[in-house]
Image (cartoon, coloured by chain):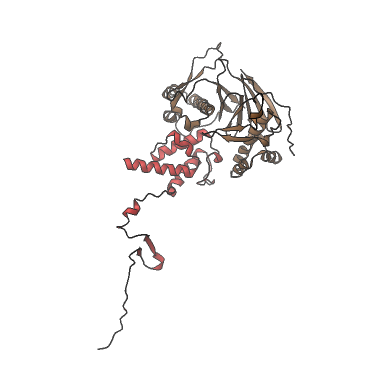
Amino acid sequence: MFSTSNLFSPIKLPSQMETHLWYSLPNEIKTESLLSQYVDLLSPLEKDHIFSISSHELQKSALIARALVRTTISRYQIGSQVSPRSLEFKKNAHGKPEVIWQNSDDWHPPPPRLHFNLSHTSSLIACGVTVDSPIGVDVEEKQRTMKNNILSFAKRYFSCEEVELLSAISDPEVQRQEFIKLWTLKEAYVKALGRGFSGAPFNTFTIRFSSMNPDSEDSGIMIVPLENPSDLTTNWQFAQLELGGSHYAAICRESNGGASMKVIVRKTIPLVEEQIISEIN
Amino acid sequence: MAAVPVTCVRLTTSMHTNQIIGKPSTLKLVSFGRATSGLSRLSRFQISCAAKPETVTKVCEIVKTQLALSADSVVEPDSKFSALGADSLDTVEIVMTLEEEFGISVEEENSQNITTVQEAADLIEKLVEKKNATA
């Protein structure tokens, strides 16, 4: 029976320079008793949603995603009342989930603004966490194939400059990989903005790669808005990683005075274990 | 002269309904309401109905293909794409396939309104009708 106290000591919040990325692999989480502990963490609305999913695999995956978000955020122990079950969430105007911090007006000094973003594939679920910066995370399977022709898809949804970049890649496999990575970058950006794909159509901005300078601290990725510059802001930075050897991940968060993003990656089985995989600078 | 009984039948039609009365098994109510000049007014009357079954079926097929679901897997009109295993890229791929299949264009702003099979089918029919009206 899971008690309300954490099994682990509290995790230090990400500094202004850091982004934390937590991920779980549903295939590794099998025991029914653990899955029912996850169910116990959920709100009534979340339970309704989970139980409405007919496929067992997808239901499990959705359950783990909710458990990952709740347990991860409460690991930082902001305030004494935070248990995974007690967290409440709301959605912004575009549907992006955010934590509702209870009684935060009473706090002196004000509590750190912890931000999170979840990305969900059937085989890996990732949750990125920052302090004081909106964040967007997107993951995709490296081996993922497209049902539509890649260049047709890019012509329909991406910007002209991005179509040119993809068209110039002659090896179809490399083209497919670069397409998937570009998708994750664009998706991470619009999720960080809090607007999503429908609020910031992908052909309204270009992700541009400046020439890689090994001495530069910059990852070399910049946003070029093609319209709506007030909505499509550019003070963002990106990180691209591979997780578990099987997935591409992109993280987008606000720029930090030119310093490149420091990412601490942890692989976790919620309530059971966690393991620092790497610290990426 | 012998008297032959004649049964006189008077067929009356109501002034207020149009009804064609045939054999009970083929009783058909053509229209209700005040007598009008015909059905033409009714056929132009905009009723928002759910999409045609053929459209819903076609959307289900496309969703199953995109998400690599088996042919006998259960995809219902109210099934949410995300609950069927679609991630963000799958949803956009589905929309693109629907655009090509039905010859329509779905503005990105509307893609957030396509979360289920039924919503996709309803939007498709709205867009197809708009396209045909302006053709």
Q: From this viewpoint, which residue is outermost toward the bottom?
A: B1
Q: From this viewpoint, which residue is outermost toward the top?
A: A215
Q: Chain in red?
A: B
**Residue shown at 64% from the left, 40% from the top:** A43
Q: Is residue A209 visible?
A: yes
Q: Is residue B22 above or below residue A244?
A: below
Marks counted in the figure total 0
User: Residue A32 occupies which quadrant of the picture?
Assistant: top right
Q: Nearer the viewer, residue B83 or B110?
A: B110
Find residue B64 and report its horizontal and vertical position in percent.
50, 41
Q: Is residue B73 above or below residue A148?
A: below
**Residue shown at 34% from the left, 52% from the top:** B43
Find residue A21 and report its horizontal and vertical position in percent.
62, 26
Q: Nearer the viewer, residue A153 or A19?
A: A19
Q: Is residue A32 left or right of residue B134?
A: right
**Residue shown at 44% from the left, 44% from the top:** B122
Find residue B1 and report its horizontal and vertical position in percent.
24, 89
Q: Is residue A124 visible?
A: no
Q: Is residue B39 left or right of residue B72?
A: left
Quadrant where the N terminus of chain A lies?
Answer: top right
Quadrant where the C terminus of chain A lies?
Answer: top right
Q: Is residue A86 left or right of residue B46?
A: right
Q: Is residue A30 above or below residue B40?
A: above
Which color is chain A depicted in?
Answer: brown
User: Residue A9 occupies which quadrant of the picture?
Assistant: top right
Find residue B22 and report its horizontal and vertical position in percent.
36, 67
